[in-house]
């Protein structure tokens, strides 16, 4: 199992040359009902198959040049199965490799 912070640190290494460490990030995990999830982060098919309750781990980092990165890992609350990772840069949705 890959932990969210590991996925975030690996992803940030591809996005910036800054040294991102655990003590320089902000993070939280929140439970959402499916009806509370923002549909713009999912394809129609992905949204249809979301579990009734999702756990979202959000991790953020602000670079020295004020670029705001946010990664959200979506999990099925009932079994902790990873559903999707969503990346945003300055509020804009990024492709997995951006």
Image: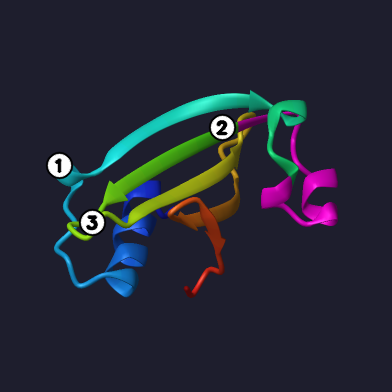
First reached walking from the N terminus: tag 3 or tag 2:
2
- What is the spatial separation of the Cα atoms under label 3 and label 2, in whole angstroms? 26 Å
User: Circle 3 is placed at which residue position?
Assistant: 63
Looking at the image, which residue sits at the far front? 65
Mark found first going from the N terminus, 1 or 3 = 1
- Number of numbered discs overlaid on the protein picture: 3
Which-is-in-front pick, marks 3 and 2?
Answer: 3
Residue assigned mark 1: 23
Q: Which residues are the magenta region?
A: 40-54
60 over 44 or under it: above or below: above
Within 10 angstroms of label 2, few (less than 14), some, or many (20 or more) residues?
many
Q: To which residue does mark 2 refer?
A: 55
- Of the residues under marks 2 and 1, which one precedes in the sequence? 1
Helix, strand or loop for disc 2: strand
In the image, is residue 20 above or below residue 17?
Answer: above
Is residue 3 visible in this depiction of the protein? no
Q: Residue 35, percent across and down?
A: 77, 28
Cα separation, mark 1 vs mark 3, equals: 14 Å
**Structural distance between the alpha carbons of marks 2 and 1:** 22 Å
CB under 8 Å between discs 2 and 1 = no
Q: Quadrant of residue 29?
A: top left
Which residue is at a point 33% across and 49% down the rendered structure image?
5
């Amino acid at each position: 199992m890959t932990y969210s912070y590991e996925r975030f640190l690996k992803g940030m290494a591809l996005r910036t040359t800054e040294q991102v460490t655990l003590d320089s990030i902000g993070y939280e995990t929140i439970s959402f009902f499916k009806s509370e999830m923002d549909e713009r982060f999912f394809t129609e098919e992905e949204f249809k198959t979301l579990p009734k309750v999702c756990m979202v781990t959000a991790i953020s980092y602000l670079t020295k040049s004020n670029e705001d990165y946010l990664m959200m890992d979506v999990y099925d609350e009932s079994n902790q199965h990873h559903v999707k990772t969503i990346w945003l840069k300055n509020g804009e949705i990024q492709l997995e490799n951006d």
